[in-house]
Amino acid sequence: MRILAISPTPSHPQDAGNRARIHAVLTALKAAGHAVHLCLLMRENPPPAAIRAMRDAWDELIEVPHDRGREARSLGPLNAIDDWILPEAEAAFAALAARVPRFDLVLVNYVFLSRALTFFDHRIIKVIDAHDIFAGRADALAALGLENRFFATTAEEEAAGLDRADLVLAIQDEERRHFTLVTRAATATLGHLPVAQQPPPPAPGGLSIGYLGSGNPLNTRALGRFLAALPPAEVAAAGGRLVVAGGACQGLAEAPGLRLLGPVADPDALYAEADLVVNPHEGGTGLKIKTVEALARGRPVIGTAAAFAGLPATSVFHAAPDAAAAARLARRWLASAAFREEIAEASARLFQRYALGVGAARARLASPSGLAGLLDRPRLLMLTDVPYWRGSLGNQARIGAVVDAAREGFDLDLFFTGDLPGAEREAARRALGRRGRLFTPRPAGEAPMPWGLTPFERARFDGALLASLEAHLARNPPQAVMVQYLRLSWMRLARGMPKLTVLDTHDVMSLRAQNFRLFGQEHFIQIPVAEELKILDGFSQVMAIQAEEARWLEALLPGRVILAPHALPALLPARGSPPGSPPRIGFIGGDSPMNRDGLRWLLDQVWPAIQPLGAELHVAGGVCAEMPKGRPGVVLRGEVPDQQDFLDTLDIAVNPVFYGGGLKIKTVEYLARGLPSVLTAEALFGIQGGAGTAYALAEDRAQFVAALALLVRDRATRARMAEAAFAFGRQRFGPQALAPAIDTLASLARGVPRLAPVSIPA
């Protein structure tokens, strides 16, 4: 391919993160055999040596004059999307679009240069490498007390710029999820992978903690907060030193325990002196290039969640909530050889996983067939009557997670069979993203009941709804259909269904009903096992939410079961109760029989033994309505506006349910927030492998009391379990947990059969 890259930033030298990113992407395309022509807006006036290096690196360098003094802010303190496009650039874009032979692909760096894409016709693939999110940037900086000195715009302006592309590249997955909601363009993640190097190990003479950063306000603020929480004098007293390099040194003075290298031409000047690299970055968006750079050079890294955004981090020391928390981890690193070894091993594993993912993404972008797959995605129609966008119940959270994951591999349509008043309709549209489409039933007569429905399905059949669905399928044929929950399974026999039909089971309902009956409760769905299996047999693929059910189903429906675990975004470890407060134990749940019975048992059988230890029990959700009032040490919070905010205030979590079946979403959330938890076997249904480390399994009252009492009394045990829980939750239920299932379905929708037998972990 003949590729035209347009950039306001030079590719040489690679002494800043955005320059390194541009160089890495173009180098990968060049290495794949493509011709790369770089159109450079001379915004940064690179020196002659850099110009020569770019001419040598690329097939052509096109220099376009650019006067930064003429850049506008036409929306008050914000930019309109084309404010930085000057007449000289427009003339250059027009000339490049008129070239013969024409370019095959135009790659624009930054959305604020997206105007360039409007000069090229539909035969040319148009790609934006976004680098960052610019909508809301000024407000985010202001919240940190910082001034915006770069481009910042509105959500509407950024969306208009992104819509000019066929494909938008995000530098990390969290930003891709944002872009899938705001643009009609296809999206993909292309991370940054610097050339891996191994600087010499630091000279002996004490432990050295290194920081490298430019003098931008985000860096200097974060570094200042880190140094305030871990003063250089304390580091020196522990036999170590802090080494700072780059423009972030400005305003600092050397002192015992603090060495300043100043600006460095080569980052290895810092890495060669650092046993550990820290990145205490707070706020901001985008991938933090210096984090990846340090990992690529084999250095262990401690940092905040913002510093590791977009990286497959699973450890608390790669997800600190702020600079002060990162400093506390660095203090622990100085004191503990075992902790130093743990961080080194985890950092090496993290970089290996990340490098494999970036390599695969680069190969897709550089391959014409891979690029075509990114642009031409199969269409998935999802059928549900659950208003999942509310996110307040477990089933809503589950469907929301599937929708979020499906947007990554499919063009998504939603056929919602329930009522949608105005505000709900708008919320449903937002949850689908601008590329997705929302449909509701239209009058289309009354369809006859299809042959082949089971008694369970016949009792729920709706002829008018089936007629509407069949009319929709005729107008908007998808490549795949996914049905949410067994109660809509009768829709599988609609005329016009594609070959690939999928049922997301949530639970095996017949087994769940049996579980309820054991405890004298009646489940809202009653169906025999044989009938449920007959229904499942009517779908080409069946999704199971956890491995225990997946193995059971696979034995009965071989080759047609997909393990699709619940997935959560990259949540932060819970901060815990306010300083000086008693240990806070928490439970959150809706007003269901299993929650009511489990919580009453806890209040009657467990809490009298725990309350004298000085702890508090905080309960949130609809279950509070049926609980006795006035119990000592018990705070009934009722429905809370933000469940994650509630979990953030807890030190310990409990889930005392003893029947119900299926995966417990709140258990998953406890683990993902790094909450040390005491859980019954039923609360852990489908979750295995972490008992005694990531959580406490209590099989009777005595075990529940003993485990909870230990966590209340022993802060060290609590801290160890919190770290293990966070790692366990990220590994099993992190943002990418659903990706393999969606990738499998997308391949099937494209007509690629499943060749390998299903693999379900033990």
Image (cartoon, grey):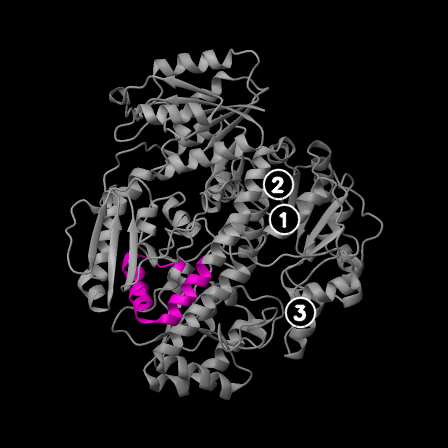
Q: Residues within 10 Å of mark 1 (few under 14, many from 20)?
A: many
Q: Earlier in the sequence, mark 1 or mark 3?
A: 3
Tell whether 600 sits left or right of 682: left
Residues under labels 1 and 2: Cα distance? 9 Å
- For residue 86, above or below residue 610: above
Overall secondary structure of the magenta section: helix
Q: Earlier in the sequence, mark 1 or mark 2?
A: 2
Give the residue pinned by disc 3: 512
x and y, in percent, of residue 35 in the image: 54, 24
x and y, in percent, of residue 331 in the image: 28, 66
Q: Residues within 10 Å of mark 3 (few under 14, many from 20)?
A: some
Write the start and end of the magenta stretch as one range.
318-347
Does residue 608 appear in the picture of this structure?
A: yes
Q: Nearer the viewer, residue 571 or 587?
A: 571
Which amino acid type corresponds to the residue marked 1 in the rendered image? Ile
Which amino acid type corresponds to the residue marked 2 in the rendered image? Phe
Question: Mark on residue 357?
Answer: none
**Count of marks, rendered view:** 3
Give the residue pinned by disc 1: 742
Q: Are marks 1 and 2 in contact (CB under 8 Å)?
A: yes
Tell whether 496 sits left or right of 521: right
